[in-house]
Amino acid sequence: MRCLLDTHVILWIAFHENKISSRVRKLLLSNDAEIFLSAVSFWEISIKFQMGKLDLKHHTPETILTGFNQYFDFQNLDLKINDAASFFQLKQTHHKDPFDRMLIWQALQDDLTLISDDEIIKRYSDTGLKVIW
């Protein structure tokens, strides 16, 4: 299974492991899953950190990424120019947050299952989005 981590899941893995569902925990530890981290998530984390809206407990977005790269075999998912150009095709009917919407779009474009506990994101299943929690 190929999966993309939602931003809040990245932060929960880093700081609140107890919030991760047992299903997701098993998946993250499984050798059967290919897990992706999106540049979009780290852009969001970096912006919110810079604005003082996100407490990273004496870490920076860079040190969190370094830690993930050292301890996990996750793949990095860059924001592709074609995904940015075609982003307008994702309807705004459910979610207004541009970061979440781009993660949804990346998951759809790359046929990834989005790992998220966001109820609004789950509504995008009508577009073909696969979500697990």
Image (cartoon, rainbow, N blue to C red):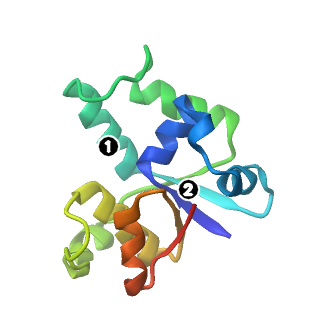
Residue under numbered circle 2: 36
What residue is shown at x 28% (from left), y 55% (from top)? 99
- For this orientation, the residue located farthest to the right is 31
- Estimate the x, y position of residue 60 in percent, counting from the top left: 40, 23
Name the image quarter holding residue 105.
Answer: bottom left
* Residue found 29% across the figure and 66% down from its top: 81
Q: Position of residue 98 (x, y in %)?
A: 22, 59
* Residue denoted by label 1: 43
- Residue 5 in the image: above or below residue 126: above
Distance from disc 2 to disc 1, alpha carbons, whole Å, reads: 15 Å
Nearer to the camera, 86 or 33: 33
Label 1: state its secondary structure. Answer: helix
Residue 118 position (above or below residue 121): above
Of residue 97 and residue 37, the one placed in the foreground of this image is 97
User: Do callouts 2 and 1 mark residues in contact (Cβ within 8 Å)?
Assistant: no
Residue 19, picture quadrant: top right
Horizontal side of 46 relative to 1 (left or right) equals: left
Pointer 1: residues within 10 angstroms few (<14), some, or many (20+)? some
> From the viewer's perspective, is 124 left or right of 133?
left
Q: Residue at x 35, y 23 (%)?
A: 55
At label 2, which amino acid type do we have? Phe
Residue at figure coordinates x 66%, y 32% from the top left: 70
User: Which residue type carries mark 1?
Assistant: Trp
Give 77 or 35, whichever is nearer the viewer: 35
Of the numbered discs 2 and 1, the one sitting upstream in the chain is 2
Q: Position of residue 10 (x, y in %)?
A: 50, 42
Q: Which mark is residue 32?
A: none
